[in-house]
Image (cartoon, grey):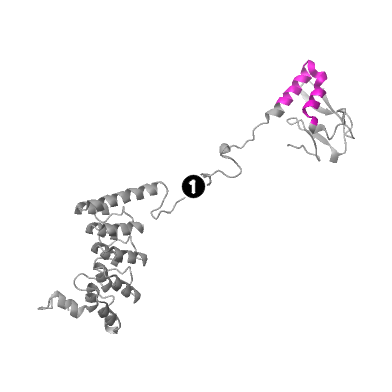
Amino acid sequence: MSVAGECGFSSEEVLNVRFPLHRACRDGDMPALHALLHSDTHRAELLTEDSFYGWTPIHWAAHFGRLECVMQLVQVGCGVNSLTSRFAQTPAHIAAFGGHPQCLMWLLQAGADLNRQDYVGETPLHKAARAGSVECINALLIQGAKADLRNASGLTGADLAHAQGFSECARLLSNAQNQQQLGRFNGFSTNNSVERPRGFSNGIPSRKRSFGCTESSQFKKARTGDLDLQMRLMSGMNGSGGENLMDTVRAELGPALSSTTGGNGSITGSFAPIGLVEQDEGLRMEDSSTSAPKEMEIFTVAAMQIPCRCTNSYAYL
């Protein structure tokens, strides 16, 4: 039976007779609500939509800010994201439009979708902006509501607040929208969680390299000290200082040769001396005596000029 067919009855009488659960939630009548919920006949009406607005009992309780009724209805099985069939609105939409921040906050903490859009694309934040409720706007923003979502007409919550003449709400929503867009641009998500940038170990050099060595290089730096020594040896062989060549080697490499030379600087043991032979193509190192056993050979790396005891291979220190 529709409301139009109920001639002679006021809307209040229709609400009392046909929708007693809705009426109890509207008035916050907890004794009547408890009594109706214990009746199987009326308990089946928890999801019934009235013929006025198409709301269920929890939508009525949310619109009038009856928090105790909302809590009781959720406890007996009503969903915090229950949608109306006519406008696809949740209790959070209704509570925000009614301007009830306590009821809205409880719904959000109970799991209500704060960014759910209704049949015209509006979220609870749009409804709070239409109502000019600063408290509801703050409650939604604290929980992470997106201030830049637009409805079917392309309007944000700030646009709606400005159109309704709520300058404080419009300014609050505009600031929140700018901060959220800036946060996403800088690598932060809307719930204030940091998104790490990719590459270069998140901006931190590895432990193996200091901050002064962060450039990419595949090559090692040359040892200038060894190069200077080699150049002096070359000049000594070509010039007049050839007779002082061994003295120069002993002075430069005295500690390194301490294990293989005696007190007078001569090479001791069974190791063969190393001679220098000048040829037309250049200079080369030549063994002047019989070679030692292979496992005890001494090789001299030209770039280092340090004799190394190796096994059939050159040692690069």
- Whether residue 235 appears in magenta in the rendering, the answer is yes
| Residue occupying image coordinates x 22% and y 79% | 20
Residue extending furthest toward the top: 240
Give the vertical position of 102 relative to 14 (above or below).
above
In the rendered structure, which segment of residues is drawn in magenta? 228-254
Asked whether the viewer can see residue 123, the reply is: no
Give the vertical position of 272 relative to 180 (above or below).
above
Q: Nearer the viewer, residue 2 or 192?
A: 192
Q: Quadrant of residue 245?
A: top right
Amino acid, disc 1 = Arg
Give the vertical position of 306 relative to 8 (above or below).
above
Q: Which residue is mark 1?
A: 198
- Residue 165 % position (x, y): 19, 52
Q: Nearer the viewer, residue 61 or 295?
A: 61
| Image position of 62 (left or right of 216) | left
- Whether residue 119 appears in magenta in the rendering, the answer is no
- Residue 187 % position (x, y): 42, 48
**What is the chief secondary structure element of the magenta stretch?**
helix
Asked whether the viewer can see residue 98, the reply is: yes
Q: Disc 1 on helix, strand or loop?
A: loop
Would you call the spot at circle 1 few (<14 residues within 10 Å), some (14-19), or many (20 or more)? few
Point out the image quarter for the C terminus.
top right
- Residue 157 % position (x, y): 27, 54
| Residue occupying image coordinates x 71% and y 25% | 228
- Residue 290 % position (x, y): 89, 32
| Image position of 27 (left or right of 284) | left
Residue extending furthest toward the left: 8
Image label count: 1
Q: Nearer the viewer, residue 204 or 168?
A: 168
| Residue occupying image coordinates x 32% and y 75% | 72
Point out the image quarter for the N terminus.
bottom left
